[in-house]
Each structure stands twice: as structure tokens, then as C-alpha cells.
Image: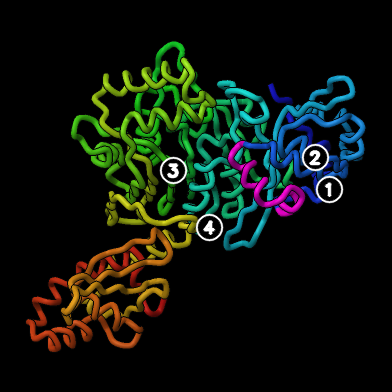
Amino acid sequence: MLPEPDPTLCRALADDLRSAEFSGASLRGAWGAQADDAVARGLRGPAERALGDRRDALAVLGRLWGLGAEVSRVDAEAALPRLGLAGAVRLGLVALDGDRVVPAALIRPQPFADAEGDVEWWIASDLDEAALGGSLPEDHVLGVGGASQTLAKLQLTWRGGSALDLGTGCGIQALRLRRLVSRVIATDISERALRFTRLNALLNDVDGIETRLGSLFEPVEGETFDRVASNPPFVITPRVAGVPAYEYRDGGLEGDALVASVIAGVGAHLEPGGVAQSLGNWEYRDGESGLDRLRAWVDPSLDAWVVEREVLDPLAYAELWVRDGGTVPGTPDYARLIDAWLDDFARRGVTGVGFGYVLLRRPLAGAPTLARYERVAGGGDTAFGPHLAACLENHDRAALLDDEGLASATLRVSPDVTEARHHRPGEESPSVIELRQGGGFARTIEVDSALAALVGACDGDLSVGALVDAIAQLLDVDAEELRADILPRVRELIVTGFLTFADA
């Protein structure tokens, strides 16, 4: 078990890391961009070769905690003058083996940027497959992985008083939430994970984070929050002998029941106006849509926005997560585990597994006004949080307007929106008109000439109603019929961020 972190030792470690300039930029500069990218893929050899025989503090700590490689006792003592090797052992970060120092954890710089500015934390976690030289133990505490990065990009920029990080792992979401709220409760079923969370909070001098041991919402029964974030152990894993169940990714329930429990239970822990954001997998079963199954889990008193990014077939899903556990193709264990996954899916009639984002909100007053369950494949490395926040604010404002009110509103086209027109050879009029979004989810939608004309004219000058009347006259169509056709589509463009209110 990881020892309970000592605040004095954590401060000493932070001082040593700071003195060594142990940052993402410095490490990338030390071993080069190509090796740095290889480290992110679990290959440490190129970085070790690039460091060569360097023995300065950055190189030594980079080997020890950036790569998870042994270093000499003499070099480690020189690199940790304040903490000392005894302190590193007491924190559970190294073990001593004669004249060698063996890493017991990783510490990696983690940059983050939001409306509050730029920050870089040091995040400690368990050794990865590259450092272990094999598959992970089932109680492995993961560092900042791809799912953690995705959830961070989704986080709304709204501030609040309190937040819940459900299934905190190494504590990265708790650290991010703490920048927006004054108090964070971080929960996990793993005491080891909670100790890493406490270590990381102390190491980065972040207060206001309380950890609690327990499953799902048990540790916060009867409590409500302004913000909830959860990167739950959503991976669908066979519950049979011989299949490892990793705490960081496998929730211990059959199929997608863990995700269903998170979605169904979170509403009871949201303050009015409170928002919960999470990632998840959901099963498609014998022709039943995964999004429809998810819709049935959502508390009907909540606003809901669910974005499904992809659907994998059972074999592709099984291969993804068997490899993630460190079992490589071509081995007997790989084939055995794939069969276990496929048998498990077949028992429930699973034809696919969806992955995506779930945003739930308790309305401030009245009934919910938002129920979006959609498939969106676009977007890349965009920080979706500000985009989602703006879309929700636009939705809330538009929801208060009847059609007459919307017709009186003045809108602007968002600056990231472009238009593409496709013409068949020799034809003057376009056969297809598309509006394309440069930011957010990078949506592309097909529109007709009337809606394209309205969007193009939304410059904050004339009202929507005035524009519709002018377009109706230009196209020689009935203005009232055009208004009835176009206003619902204008609402959709507002919610998805193509249009925004001119005075926003």
C-alpha cells in the first residue's frame, strides 16, 4: 500500500522538482520531440538513448520518475538534496537496491489551461507497462490518460461553490475542478488511488480537496454539488474467472450497468443549476440503440445533452481493451481473452458499444428544456468546455423565447463558421450548400439557400424576422410559411453554436 503522504516531504519534493526544472518543456527539450512522443506511446528507449550519460538533476529525475527507470544512488541523492532518498522511500516513490534506486511510481508534468490561466502540475501515479516490463496489476492507479484529457476538455468553465469528482483515480479531475470551485470531494473505491490524490494535491500545494473511500455515491449520500465530474471505470469487461479486472477501468458490474448507475444516480446530487459531466460506454443490444438505452437511465427532471462519438463492434472493442491491459496479439492469453469478451457480449446480444460524453443539469426552475441525444464524430483537440458553456447559455436564452420573440432577436454568425457550395459542372445554382464549424465539435450541416442566406446576413444589424421577410421577397415565397420553416432550424443553429445572440 502506498504510504500516507507527509506534507513536509511533499513540499521538499516539490522544491527539488522545481530546482531541477522538472517540466514538460524541459523534459521534451532534454530528450527531444520524437522521444517525447514515444514516451506518450509507452516507449522509453528513445528517451533513454537521448539522455545518454547525462547526470544532471533533470536527466536523473527524468529517468527515475518520467520514464520509470533505475538510476544510481549517488545521482539520485544529488538530484534530491531537500527530500533525500529516505524521504522518497517514505513517500513510497522509490525503493533502494544496493547502489541503485528503483522507481516505485511515476511523476510526470501535466500542463493545463483554462480561463484562470496556464498551470502545470506534477502528477504521481503507478508505474506503467513500459516501466514494469509487462502487464499491469489489477490495483493499478492510472496517470493522466486519454480519457482524462478528454473529460478535461469537456469541462464547463462555470464556477461554483462545491464539486464532486466521482472515481478520482490519481486526482487530476479534482485538481481541475478546484480551479472553479472552493471545495472538492474526491471519491474512489481504491484507498491507493485516494492516497495518490492526496499526494498530488500536497505536491502541487492545492488545498480544498477532501478524499472519501467508497463506491459510487455512497460516500456523499444526502449531499449536493454545483459540479460533478466523473471518468468512471466504464470499460465493459467479462465477469468470469481468468479475466483481469483493473480497478481504474472496470467497475465490477456486468455490461454497462456501472455507467447506468452513475447516470441514473447523479441527479440526486445536483444543486439547482448544477451540472454533471462524465464519459461512458453503452451497449447496443439486438437492434436496440445504445442512445435509447441511455435515455432511459436519465432522470426525467434533468436537462440532458449526450454526444456519442463512435460505436465499435464487439471484436474491435475487445481488442482495444485486451491490448490496453498489456496483453499482446499473437499470444495464447490474447486469443483466450478475446474469446471471453465475445462470449460475454453474445450472452447479452450486444451488437456494438458506443462511447461518448454525458452532460446532465438540474434546471434552476421549471421543467427541463434540453434533451439532445446525438451522434457527432467531428472535433479534435479542441477544448470543448467553453464551446459547450456558450451553447448552453444560448440554448437557455432561446428557450425563453417564443417564435415571435426569436423573430425579434438579432443574431451574429459565429466567427469560426464557413460556407461551402458544391456545383455540378455547368450548373449555376449549387446542388449542396454546407455550413462548417471550425471550433467546437466541427459540425458540418447541409442547408438550403434560404437558411444559407439568413446565416450569411446575421451580422448583428437586422432582426431574424426582418431577414426572413427580405429573403422571402427575394425568393418569391410566402413569408409566413418561410418563417414557420426556418425558425426551428435557427434555434438548432443557436444551440449548436453556428449562431449567437448579437449582444452576447
Q: Which quadrant of the rendered structure holds the N terminus?
A: top right
Q: What element carries label 4?
A: loop
Up/down of 17 relative to 3, above or below: below
Q: Which of marks 2 and 1 is nearer the N terminus?
A: 1
What amino acid type should be assigned to the residue bearing mark 1? Ala
Q: Earlier in the sequence, mark 1 or mark 3?
A: 1
Q: Which quadrant of the rendered structure holds the C terminus?
A: bottom left
What amino acid type should be assigned to the residue bearing mark 3? Ser
Q: Is mark 3 on a helix, strand or loop?
A: strand
Label 1–label 4 contact, CB within 8 A: no
Q: Residues within 10 Å of mark 1 (few under 14, many from 20)?
A: some
Q: Which residue is drawn at 35% across and 33% down?
A: 260
Label 4, label 3: how many angstroms apart (C-alpha)? 17 Å
Label 1, label 3: how many angstroms apart (C-alpha)? 36 Å
Where is mark 3, residue-wise?
278
Instruction: Locate residue 219, reporting x and y percent.
Output: 52, 30
Instruction: Locate residue 14, reporting x and y percent.
Output: 80, 44
Determine if residue 276 is in view: yes
Up/down of 221 relative to 96, above or below: below
